[in-house]
Image: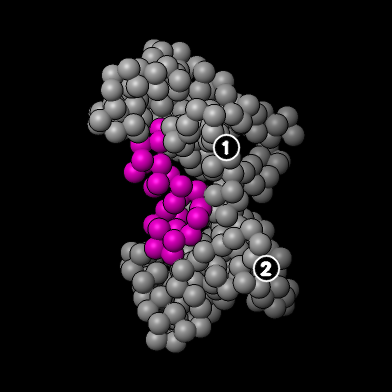
Amino acid sequence: MRLILKTILERMALAVLTLFIVSVLIFSSVALLPGDFAKAVLGQSATPETVAAFQKQVGLDRSATERYVAWLGGAVKGDFGNSFSSRPGAERSVASIIKPRLWNTLVLAGLTAAVAIPLAISLGIAAALWRNSWFDRSVNAGTLTTISVPEFFVAYVLILLLAVKFPLFRPLSTVRPQMGIAETLENLALPVITLTLVIVAHMMRMTRAAIIGVLGSPYVEMARLKGAPPLRIVLRHALPNALAPIANVVAFNLAYLIVGTVIIEAVFVYPGIGQALVDAVRTRDVPVVQACALLFALTYILLNLIADLVAIATNPRLLHPR
């Protein structure tokens, strides 16, 4: 047990160190971008006095080290400063901009995960049970097709088929706070289907490979000799011991649902954090860009940390060290 606790603490320390390094890279990358951010926000016709006043207002007159320390200190407390789009007397905090967008992205990711994860694991179990059958070959061919096609192409094909030719769903995924659950689900149907088709292949194929690898173990052979049915062997003996690689690929795809949905949100005009990042890059709103990038990194690191902890908890060599 002490070894497991030590391993967990080491992984958590590594996650914190990784996040710190990523924060330095994010801040440095944005700071090294060419051009004057003040002139980009105010316009080329702004006078030098106006530019200097704006730089002092947002802190651009300070050194990069001072700005990074102030930014990191605020980020630890959840304060990312004010947006460059703010005006005196009408300041907009970065948190107020990205908070509703982040919630929208989490809703989309949660709905997709609720559909994709059970579907992928079920297909992986079925493909492992009937490997080399017509079902196994069909599922593998279908998932390989969806994983080989760019996600924006999948989105446009679904819009053409399910919103234009057969108008079952809405082509644009606009959401408003006053919308009901049924209307929200209807608007999110197409992006959820698109993301499910994009990510289900990885999880299904890893589930299939992990279970097939475990099915050759001696304890599985013993269960088979005792007359246990194939489905029970998979669910009670193979699946629990194949959780580590499955958890890793699930965590990777969950991170993608939050970090990598920029294209999908742009296609369906969905007001998520990916769309907020695109808008901030276009308007040179540096604080919003930095906050979105740091949240993406934090999400990816946390989900991979959870996957590592699941792998540690399900690894017999760590649970029962010799």
* Badge 2 element: loop
Q: Is the magenta stretch mostly helix, strand or loop?
A: helix
> Is 248 rendered above or below residue 168?
above
Identify which residue, 290 or 153, lies in the foreground: 290
Question: Within 10 angstroms of label 1, few (less than 14), some, or many (20 or more) residues?
Answer: some
**Residue 305, horizontal then vertical, whole percent:** 58, 40
Q: What stretch is highlighted in magenta?
A: 260-286
Q: Can residue 242 be seen from the camera position used here?
A: no
Q: Please indicate whether residue 154 sits to the left or right of residue 257 in the image.
A: left
Residue 81 placement (x, y as % from top left): 53, 28
In terms of secondary structure, where does tag 1 sit? helix
Dot 1 corresponds to which residue?
Answer: 95
Q: Is residue 269 magenta?
A: yes
* Frontmost residue, 10 versus 169: 169
Q: What residue type is labelled 1?
A: Ala
Marks 2 and 1, how far apart at CA: 25 Å
Residue drawn at 52 percent across, 23 percent down = 72
Quadrant of the image occupied by residue 287: top left
**Residue at x 51%, y 53% (from the top left corner):** 272
